[in-house]
Amino acid sequence: MRCTFFTTPISRRYKDDALSEDYLFVAAPLYKADVAQKLLDRFNKDLFHISYSRVRRTPVDKAWPMKDLLPPIIDRSKEFITHLLALPWPDISADELQRWRDMQELRFVFRNLAQSISNIADAQIASLEIHVKGI
């Protein structure tokens, strides 16, 4: 997992990737340097790539290191949501903004990803250009 949304500055954007800096939220590493590469390599090899190391894992080392992998992503996501909610979004409904506030709560973290889909993306590009970039 490259976590490019939170970690990549605009100057290093790949093609049309959406980045946190598009929303004035500074890119920053998610993990301390000493564990970052190990976690990211594991995530990439075991989830996104067909690799031999994946099939050689034992029951002991097959479990995902969730206590190391998820908390930084969750914390950074909550910071991002707080940042987004502090911006003026007159064209986003109160219900939609409440769904984003709900995502900051602990109970939300345990929801199924499929149940956590928000439609704010539909309007955010236009809103970003109008309200943040002044276009």
Image (cartoon, grey):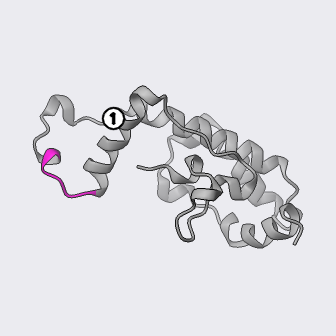
Query: Over which residues does the magenta segment extend?
Result: 49-53
> Is any part of residue 13 visible from this angle?
yes
- Identify the residue at horizontal 50%, vertical 41% (top origin): 110
Please state the horizontal and vertical placement of residue 86, each as a whole percent of the image.
83, 47
Q: Main secondary structure of the magenta part?
A: loop
Could you tell whether 23 is left or right of 90 in the image? Answer: left
Query: Relative to 37, does residue 113 appear above or below in the rendering?
Result: below
Residue 50 among magenta residues? yes
Q: Name the residue type under label 1.
A: Lys
Q: Determine the residue positioned at 57% across, 57% down.
A: 12
70 is higher (above) or lower (below) than 21: above
Camera-side residue of 90 and 114: 90
Residue 67 seen anywhere in this rendered image of the structure: no
Q: Residue furthest front?
A: 11
Residue under the point 40% across and 29% down: 35
Q: Residue at image x 49%, y 28%?
A: 32
Query: Can you identify the residue that label 1 sits on?
Result: 38
